[in-house]
Amino acid sequence: MTHEITSLLSAARDGNDDAYTRVVSLLYQDLRALARAIARDPAATLNPTALLHETYIKLNSASGVPVNREHFLAVAARAMRQVLCNHARDRVAQKRGAGALHVTLDHDDATLAFEADRLLDLDRALDELEREDRLLGRIAECRLFAGMSESETAIALDLPLRTLQRHHAQARARLQEKLGARG
């Protein structure tokens, strides 16, 4: 299936829209599992189906076509991160009023607002890490938002596995530092 996906992505880069649709169809279960895993996280602000649909729209409007399955999943992870963070920003804006009548939040609303803030903290830390070291930021994004294994991340970013492992350890440590400084 990996070879078929790579071939279809090549055809999509050559302008075959049906090939791209076929890739999405073949990877739908992977994308759904990814959305389920992300939405299961307490910091998630969307349910898996909504996250998957918003990501699909974002992927369809993106320019450029990934080169292989792992690269496609890395692009999908970035799209999911953007969708989640946009939704979290909206939730935080609602929490802070956004020009609306002020009411007391119940426990579930307060929890969701806290989780949205936490997700936005992670997003800011990832952005900061990416500005300092683009590779470390991409590694953290693939591992955190795509749930990709070390070998999948290495393939997606075209790195030797051992190099990826070394950089992943650095990315984790730097993110923990950044998040610790915020808390």
Image: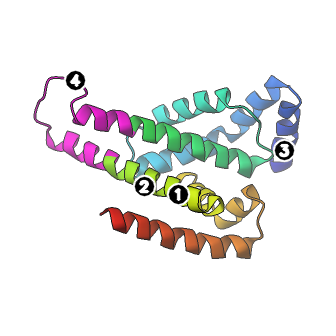
Alpha carbon distance from label 3 to label 4: 48 Å
Secondary structure found at label 1: helix
Residue 44 lies, in percent from the top left, at 39, 46
Which label number is shown at residue 44? none
Q: Tell me the residue that label 2 is attached to.
A: 122
Kindly check if marks 1 and 2 are in contact, taking CB atoms under 8 A apart as contact.
Answer: yes
Which span of residues is magenta-colored?
A: 88-116
If you read the primary sequence from the N terminus, does the residue marked by circle 2 or circle 3 appear first? 3
Residue at left offset 29%, top offset 34%: 93
Instruction: Determine crowd level at label 4: few under 14, some 14-19, many 20+ residues with C-alpha closer than 10 A.
Output: few
Alpha carbon distance from label 2 to label 4: 26 Å
Q: Tell me the residue that label 1 is attached to.
A: 144
Residue 87 lies, in percent from the top left, at 40, 35
Scheme by which the image is coloured: rainbow
User: Disc 3 residue type?
Assistant: Thr
User: Disc 4 residue type?
Assistant: Gly
* Nearer mark to the viewer, of 1 and 2: 2
What secondary structure is the stretch in magenta mostly built from? Answer: helix
* 159 up-or-down from 14: above or below: below
Q: Tell me the residue that label 4 is attached to.
A: 99
Position of 15 with respect to 64 (left or right) is right
Residue at left offset 71%, top offset 44%: 72
If you read the primary sequence from the N terminus, does the residue marked by circle 1 or circle 2 appear first? 2
* Nearer mark to the viewer, of 2 and 3: 2
Q: Tell me the residue that label 3 is attached to.
A: 6
Alpha carbon distance from label 2 to label 3: 32 Å
Q: Find the residue positioned furthest to the front.
A: 132
* Nearer mark to the viewer, of 3 and 4: 4
Residue 136 lies, in percent from the top left, at 61, 63
* 115 up-or-down from 93: above or below: below
